[in-house]
């Protein structure tokens, strides 16, 4: 799932910059999603990227399910390099922005990570978590772009189409990992019970 809303959500590209905490709305979102996740029969683990906003989102979930938050660097936001902290309205004016939207598989952030590297990192982290908790349920709190990339991979969709996927703050995306490949159970779920999610 994605972390909750921050004071800069939708306005800046915070990336991996430290010191960005949840806004009041984000804390409310985290509490609400914790209540949804607490309805599941059992949650075996709660993971978060090392950034403050993900750990703050994961904390009420971990409390609600009787687990502790474990950090996993594989869940980190994309490394936006020189674009880190910049206003989105300014970045959208750059000619490179069209490449980010239409041909992300061919783009590397100046001084940062490529989308392909990000996708490999997040899918590798999720595969390791799934293997560690085989047959169980694990919550992984990450960031919009890595989650979109993981969903694209699970669907067998090319990375160049991943910008068509929407991942809202504190939304739940559920993927079942098994021997025959991943099954996407839900994407960008904001409300409703999670107990009914299962492969059909």
Image (tube, rainbow, N blue to C red):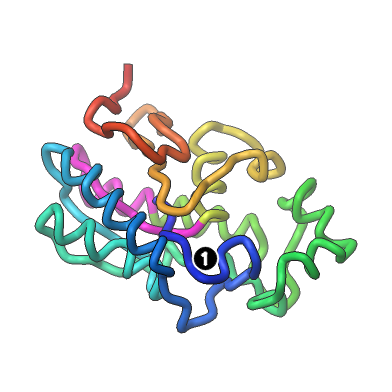
Residue 167: x and y in percent read 52, 46
Which contiguous range is marked in magenta?
Answer: 126-143
Residue at label 1?
77
Residue 10 occupies quadrant: bottom right
| In-image side of 95 versus 5 (left or right) | right
Q: Residue furthest bottom?
A: 19
Tell me if I can see residue 181 in this picture.
Answer: no
Tell me if I can see residue 168 in this picture.
Answer: yes
| In-image side of 59 versus 24 (left or right) | left
Identity of the residue drawn at 81% across and 59% down: 97
Identity of the residue drawn at 65% across and 76% down: 84
| In-image side of 48 versus 102 (left or right) | left
In-front residue for pair 159/120: 159
Residue 185: x and y in percent read 38, 29
Tell whether position 127 is magenta: yes
Tell whether position 173 is magenta: no
Identity of the residue drawn at 80% across and 61% down: 92
As drawn, 160 above or below 185: below
Residue 182: x and y in percent read 41, 33
Looking at the rendered structure, the secondary structure element under dot 1 is loop
Q: Residue furthest right?
A: 95
Identity of the residue drawn at 65% across and 71% down: 80
Image quadrant in which the C terminus is located: top left
| In-image side of 137 versus 140 (left or right) | left
Q: How many marks?
A: 1
């Amino acid at each position: 799932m994605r972390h909750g809303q921050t004071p800069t959500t939708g306005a800046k590209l915070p990336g991996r910059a430290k010191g960005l905490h949840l806004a009041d709305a984000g804390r409310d979102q985290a509490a609400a999603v914790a209540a949804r996740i607490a309805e599941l029969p059992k949650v075996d683990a709660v993971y978060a990227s090392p950034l403050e906003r993900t750990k703050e989102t994961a904390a009420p979930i971990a409390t609600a399910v009787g687990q502790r938050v474990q950090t996993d660097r594989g869940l980190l936001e994309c490394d936006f390099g020189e674009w880190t902290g910049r206003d989105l309205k300014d970045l959208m004016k750059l000619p490179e922005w069209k490449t980010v939207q239409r041909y992300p598989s061919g783009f590397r952030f100046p001084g940062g990570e490529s989308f392909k590297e990000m996708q490999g990192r997040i899918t590798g982290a999720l595969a390791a978590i799934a293997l560690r908790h085989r047959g169980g349920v694990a919550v992984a709190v990450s960031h919009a772009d890595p989650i979109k990339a993981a969903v694209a991979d699970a669907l067998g969709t090319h990375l160049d189409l991943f910008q068509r996927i929407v991942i809202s703050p504190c939304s739940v995306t559920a993927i079942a990992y098994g021997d025959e490949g991943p099954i996407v159970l839900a994407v960008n779920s904001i409300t409703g019970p999670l107990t009914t999610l299962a492969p059909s």
